[in-house]
Every structure is written in structure tokens, then in C-alpha cells.
Image (cartoon, rainbow, N blue to C red):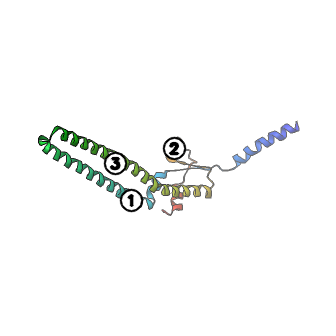
């Protein structure tokens, strides 16, 4: 009997400690805070420059294709069937290269975006983690993922902004 009482006391003891502690839950609109970080301006400029360079390259390829096509159309009436077939094949291959280049540049743009944004995200996450530890939060959620929010939930964005020096 005494063993059962001691066992019940040991089982209930942790629950008593948990309920005695203040459970702090926080939330943040991480995207909003990240867009306020000064590093975002540099990120946006680098991406705009990168994408502009790629756009110019594709436009140059497209212009070359259009010029060759226009020249072919002008000369077509004077060319033999075998030369017409060869030139048409060249144009088809050129169009395929343009499409492949476009796909490659899109993939490179996505990689560049991830490469540039990762350090900014890591800095933001470090600030969120620091705020969580300093203020004894049990959890901090992204605002976008919250389906229900109690009045006791705390918006940690002001604390994270302070941690990042954005105030």
C-alpha cells in the first residue's frame, strides 16, 4: 500500500512542477520581420542584378534567332531543298538551346536566391532562438501556422526586432 502511495506521488510530482511553472508560448510573423532586416536590400539588389544579366543574355540569344530566321525567310526562295532543310534544322536546334538555357538560368536563379537568403534566415532564426531562451518561452510558432491563438500567447516580433537591432 505504501509503495502504491509513493509511486502515485512520484508520478504526480512532475505534473505539479509543470503546472506550477508559467508556460509561455510565442508567435511571430517571421517574413515581416525578415523584410525589415537591412540585409534584405542587398539580397534584393544582388538578385535583381543576377536576373537582369540572365534576361539580357536570353534576349541576345532570342535576337540572334530572330535575325537568322528573318534572313532565312528572305533567302528561302533562292535556296535548294537540302539547304532549306539544313537551315530549318539549325533554327530548331537554336530554339532548343534557348529553351534549355532558359531552364538552366531559372534553376541557377533559384539556387542563387537560396544561397543569398540562407544567411539572413539563419540570423533571424538565431535571434528568435535567443529571444526564446532569454524569455523562457516553451515554444515560438510562426504566425502563419497558428490555427488558434490564446490571449496568453505572446507576439515576440518586438523582442526579435530588438535582438536584431531593428528598433
Q: Nearer the viewer, residue 115 or 138?
A: 115
Q: Quadrant of the N terminus?
A: top right
Q: Nearer the viewer, mark 3 or mark 2?
A: 3
Read off the residue under disc 1: 46
User: x, y (%) of residue 34?
Assistant: 46, 55
SS class, disc 1: helix
The quarter of the picture where residue 57 lies is bottom left
User: Does residue 106 appear to the left or right of 37 in the view shown?
Assistant: left
Point 52% across, 43% down: residue = 146
Tell me the crowding category of disc 1: few under 14, some 14 to 19, or many 20 or more residues within 10 angstroms, Cα based.
some
Read off the residue under disc 3: 101
- The mark that comes first in sequence, 3 or 2, is 3
Tell me the crowding category of disc 2: few under 14, some 14 to 19, or many 20 or more residues within 10 angstroms, Cα based.
few
143 lies above or below 159: above
Q: Looking at the image, which residue sits at the far left?
A: 78
Q: Nearer the viewer, residue 96 or 6?
A: 96
Q: Nearer the viewer, residue 1 or 107?
A: 107
User: x, y (%) of residue 43?
Assistant: 41, 58
Q: CA distance from mark 3 to mark 1?
A: 20 Å
- The mark that comes first in sequence, 1 or 2, is 1
91 lies above or below 54: above
Contact between labelled residues 1 and 3, with CB atoms less than 8 Å apart: no
Point 26% across, 41% down: residue = 92
Q: Nearer the viewer, residue 62 or 130?
A: 62
SS class, disc 3: helix
Read off the residue under disc 2: 145
User: x, y (%) of residue 114?
Assistant: 45, 52
Q: CA distance from mark 3 to mark 2?
A: 37 Å
Point 51% across, 43% down: residue = 145
User: Does residue 22 appear to the left or right of 70 in the view shown?
Assistant: right
Q: CA distance from mark 1 to mark 2?
A: 30 Å
Amino acid at each position: 500500500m505504501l509503495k502504491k502511495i509513493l509511486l502515485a506521488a512520484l508520478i504526480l510530482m512532475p505534473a505539479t512542477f509543470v503546472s506550477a511553472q508559467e508556460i509561455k508560448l510565442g508567435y511571430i510573423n517571421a517574413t515581416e520581420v525578415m523584410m525589415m532586416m537591412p540585409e534584405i536590400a542587398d539580397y534584393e539588389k544582388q538578385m535583381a542584378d543576377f536576373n537582369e544579366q540572365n534576361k539580357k543574355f536570353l534576349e541576345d540569344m532570342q535576337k540572334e534567332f530572330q535575325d537568322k530566321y528573318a534572313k532565312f525567310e528572305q533567302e528561302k526562295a533562292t535556296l535548294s531543298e537540302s539547304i532549306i532543310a539544313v537551315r530549318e534544322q539549325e533554327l530548331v536546334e537554336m530554339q532548343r538551346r534557348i529553351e534549355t538555357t532558359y531552364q538552366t538560368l531559372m534553376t541557377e536563379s533559384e539556387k542563387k536566391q537560396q544561397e543569398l537568403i540562407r544567411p539572413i534566415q539563419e540570423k533571424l532564426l538565431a535571434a528568435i532562438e535567443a529571444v526564446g531562451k532569454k524569455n523562457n518561452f516553451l515554444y515560438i510558432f510562426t504566425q502563419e501556422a497558428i490555427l488558434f491563438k490564446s490571449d496568453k500567447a505572446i507576439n515576440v516580433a518586438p523582442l526579435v526586432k530588438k535582438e536584431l537591432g531593428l528598433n
